[in-house]
Amino acid sequence: MKVGILNITGYGGIELARILNRHPQFKITSVTGRSAAGEQLADIFPHLSELSLTIKDELDEKVDLVFSALPHAASAEKLKPYIENGQRVIDFSADFRLNDIADYEAWYGNNHPLPGHLSLASYGLPELNRESIRNSTLVANPGCYPTASILALAPAMANSLITDDVIIDAKSGVSGAGRGLSLNTHFSELNESIKAYSVSGHRHMPEVVQELSKLTHDVNMKLTFLTHLIPITRGILVSAYAGLNISKLGNKSNASEVIRDVYQEYYKHEKFVTVADQPPTTKQAQGTNQCLIYPTIDTRTNRLIVISCIDNLVKGAAGQAVQNANILFGFPEDTGLQDLALYP
Amino acid sequence: MKVGILNITGYGGIELARILNRHPQFKITSVTGRSAAGEQLADIFPHLSELSLTIKDELDEKVDLVFSALPHAASAEKLKPYIENGQRVIDFSADFRLNDIADYEAWYGNNHPLPGHLSLASYGLPELNRESIRNSTLVANPGCYPTASILALAPAMANSLITDDVIIDAKSGVSGAGRGLSLNTHFSELNESIKAYSVSGHRHMPEVVQELSKLTHDVNMKLTFLTHLIPITRGILVSAYAGLNISKLGNKSNASEVIRDVYQEYYKHEKFVTVADQPPTTKQAQGTNQCLIYPTIDTRTNRLIVISCIDNLVKGAAGQAVQNANILFGFPEDTGLQDLALYP
Amino acid sequence: MKVGILNITGYGGIELARILNRHPQFKITSVTGRSAAGEQLADIFPHLSELSLTIKDELDEKVDLVFSALPHAASAEKLKPYIENGQRVIDFSADFRLNDIADYEAWYGNNHPLPGHLSLASYGLPELNRESIRNSTLVANPGCYPTASILALAPAMANSLITDDVIIDAKSGVSGAGRGLSLNTHFSELNESIKAYSVSGHRHMPEVVQELSKLTHDVNMKLTFLTHLIPITRGILVSAYAGLNISKLGNKSNASEVIRDVYQEYYKHEKFVTVADQPPTTKQAQGTNQCLIYPTIDTRTNRLIVISCIDNLVKGAAGQAVQNANILFGFPEDTGLQDLALYP
Amino acid sequence: MKVGILNITGYGGIELARILNRHPQFKITSVTGRSAAGEQLADIFPHLSELSLTIKDELDEKVDLVFSALPHAASAEKLKPYIENGQRVIDFSADFRLNDIADYEAWYGNNHPLPGHLSLASYGLPELNRESIRNSTLVANPGCYPTASILALAPAMANSLITDDVIIDAKSGVSGAGRGLSLNTHFSELNESIKAYSVSGHRHMPEVVQELSKLTHDVNMKLTFLTHLIPITRGILVSAYAGLNISKLGNKSNASEVIRDVYQEYYKHEKFVTVADQPPTTKQAQGTNQCLIYPTIDTRTNRLIVISCIDNLVKGAAGQAVQNANILFGFPEDTGLQDLALYP
């Protein structure tokens, strides 16, 4: 299958290139890159010289699948012809993630470029939404934080085990902020420092509420969502806290085991979710499409605590996109995604 | 004043040495170090060669003040004669922090070596407990996490602005784990990774509950407290979340400003607490005795969010110990503690 | 092919497991680990749980190939029966690298456990020694520093372009120091610091001299070799400096281009050496079996400067071992080794 | 004394502010900052809020001393009136470091803004040039690399112990690249990576040759100087290699001790140079004005090896500037510079 990538020159784009290079079914045949048109990809990213690709202004061939790693707004605009042609499209941006245009416009600050096409999109979190993706031609690849957050709470939510009282404290490596230049990605400012950011509200929050809310009618989630920047390159660790409907857990004395069983049951057929025996670390997911999840109970307060870890560029972006592509084309879902973690 | 340091060879001890070296009133005259007796301090720590100290088995001179940087249990045992003599003592360990021996024994797993002396101790968080410290000879220097956590929530707690629903998500640099050898401090394991630890309960939790509970009778705090290890050397960032008694805030529309005013009023005379205008970073406190605090409100959920940052080895250990020492001897509280942050 | 790994629990061992897991021809069927016998590999390394291996005291099955990731001396002792049986063996340790036993004993400080078997061994640097490896059953996998150093200077040495005056300044990430506990691998000691170590002589030096000296009779290399520890996990960058036989370069004005051509010609058939267009960074090799080399000339002093980069755990250890295994069994040399760099 | 700082908003400027804040004799009364005029310093750098300074377009008061932390060319232009008025000036830039204008213009690529004033300047490395500084009003503060490099080799050079064959392999933290935005300071690009840069020649090289050449007529140094970027914030480690006039060392068997004695004798009165007993690490100098030097001999090749470490922002910039200011005004040279290292 021929693949085109819009804006390969960001971190999402080059990670996609890395993964697809080993994929037996997809071949990258055409790529664009903002402000780098005409350049060889190898000149910008020597580690990708094996791909021998020239960056173009436009995708210049008939491709079977288009990935867009463009930022929001620009992405929907550029994808318009492909969507209207009914070509298969996977969009890394937020443009097609939110069902409610008002939400989109409130959080992203621009009019939606293609409001009429929103209903065509499927939210590309396969573990919750596989059938919808399979029958779709437009997949909205989830945000990195929402991927880790939704997977962390879905089993509890779907089983109505938690109350509306939910806090997600998320910690991310710096590659999530992209390759753009800013004091927010300046080495000397970030290194040896921890900071909270987007304290008044992060754009990924509404995705989390939207998708989790679909899982139950019992809970109207009251979510506080706070993001932190950590001086590592890759990795997200989410610590989720929720009030517990302890009555639903039966015998309180082994509530942690019960919760654990609920999680294992929920994800028992999933190749990319591991319910871990011990609290996971982001390094254990480095370079892989895995989401590692550890649920437990704070028995002093009857709160659910869930730790989840992903590599933000893989399960949080390019790997999940390839997982979605495999679904779209009927390939085994882990095709090209079988690497173990690069550890240490 | 002559100062003795028990166990100078850990990170708390050498940080104390660094600070006292510039203190105009205290002079280190005698030091011990576990398993390093007989060695020159300069041979183990070349950066301290200016101090010209030999590590001894026992403090060998009459000193006016003893700092103990020994671990719990060992600390109380070694301090016994000094306490019984009525000498001034500042203990970095947890031995004299908890008022309830049962709590101590449950969390630390050993019998308390000096239960009869517990009542002599003052909890050494000057911002909440200054008068008690001044009149004490035995100061229990707070833990690093409790320092950042208690200061983050004290104004809200003292003003009964929050409900019992409190979550503290704390992130710490690695120096808090000490200089001992363990996979928990191994570079290749920690670097480029984030992990939660002590997920079933961290020893610092009861201190936080104990001290905050003293500030009000209105709230019986239901605290979930989770700690994370971040690959930086120094720094703690605490993200505290609490339900808000929104009725107490008057006009809800400017609740964040009201909260901010409450915090500024509460700390207006404090030299080492800064209520920040923007979310602080741990780097802004690096090498200083400052606690930087940023309170705000999640208006979608009516929760209080407070971010606080300290250098865990300074305000979280040695700097606070010197602050306490200044109080004990009637020196200005910031004597020897005026450094600005080492930034970047 | 069935593969056994002696001492899988170090970083060399688990990196080998990561690579072999994707190898279509080799299957790990038996593993040992010092002091972890009886444990599941997944309990120690959750990221390897897919392998479902139990750590044994001894390799318990007939295997077609043995990799030893044991330290020197222990490795030769454990490998003795396999070597004597004529089984194929690849040894990560230094035991079979040095041709001269006196050198070995001087640098490693122990008697050689199997001096009579030394002559059976082939030095496992395929780019210089492919035929010898192919005909061997005992491959001494090179050290990480020697791999980067020898490849950096081989073309110049083989073409007699340099004088005897050679300095190698090598910088390594911390994973090269292994998983053992020591202040040399303690996060707070290493992080945010640079240090030179083994200043009086590093054990990898004689390998470099031995192998480079085989390439020419014209130069009796006078090598100074200094190693530095850098606070990153993976990666070695070698900066090599050598006096230049400028007369051999013909037209001095384009000497850098001539040198570059010499290097490209020398490595033109090599899949794992890239003569780079711009100075490479270790990150460009992260997770790959590539050695990136950039030769240039300091025209003010007529010295050759060569920069080379590898991932110390891949081309510097486990990847090169798999490359050697492919040669031993006649598989294409890059089987299982085609990953692009994990970048950023 | 009233002090003005031109361009306080870079890392050199804020480090100077940090140091001067504790200096008993100097008070910062006026500051400028490129493109930040009108802002409060505290808004850009919250850790400096104690200074209560407003950034102006021009220094607005009569000051006794002007520090310029402007980049080259801009610095000389801005300093012109102060120099012509005979005011005391300390310039962080390269504008007044090189005696030969042709050298300056070749390496910096611009015409010198004030060629007629070059002869007024003194090269501000107090350990080699103290008297000249004392009698000067215009001090050219040395570059960070030259400071570490010149101090590393000066004793050997002054005693004619080395040949012309000199290689300096320098490793620097990222703060040396300033606060400007560039892929060269982008966290995700630098973190977990090592790279050589300015491989065809670094601007700091001619300073090193110029100043070392003044120490002897015996050697016409043939210097190769290569710089590397290391993912730490602060610190430079220089590894210097030089051929040895072994005949000058007398008894060869204890040549390392002889060299060491030469170094200790040379620096015996210096407060900011420590000839270390063991190879130093950059962390041991963090936050201090110290240069730690370890000379030794590679006995296999008769080469001198010298390791030197500084904090590039202190002894490599702002600390050395304050040291120079103390000399200019006759204060004890370590006034305001007595901090021990922030370790770990």
Image: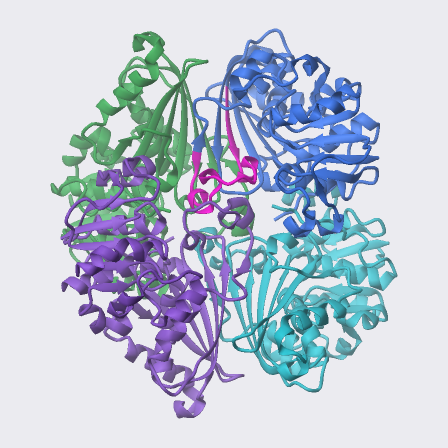
Chain colours: A green, B blue, C purple, D cyan
Using the image as rendered, state which of residue A329 and residue B75 is in the foreground: B75
Using the image as rendered, state which of residue D41 and residue D129 is in the foreground: D129
What span is in magenta?
Answer: B167-195
Q: Is residue C296 left or right of residue C123?
A: right
Q: Residue at x 18, y 64 (%)?
A: C328
Which quadrant of the figure has residue D60?
bottom right
Q: Is residue A147 left or right of residue B135?
A: left
In the image, is residue B168 part of the stretch drawn in magenta? yes
Give the percent coordinates (x, y) of residue A77.
Answer: 30, 46
Identify whether B83 is placed above or below D303.
above
Q: Is residue D24 left or right of residue A267?
A: right
- Can residue A32 be seen by looking at this rendering? no
- Can residue D332 be seen by looking at this rendering? yes
Give the percent coordinates (x, y) of residue C326.
Answer: 19, 61
Q: Is residue C41 left or right of residue C335?
A: right
Q: Residue at x 69, y 87 (%)?
A: D218
In the image, is residue D1 part of the stretch drawn in magenta? no
Which quadrant of the figure has residue B208?
top right
Give the percent coordinates (x, y) of residue C193.
Answer: 56, 53
Identify whether C93 is placed above or below C278.
above
Give the percent coordinates (x, y) of residue D196.
Answer: 48, 66
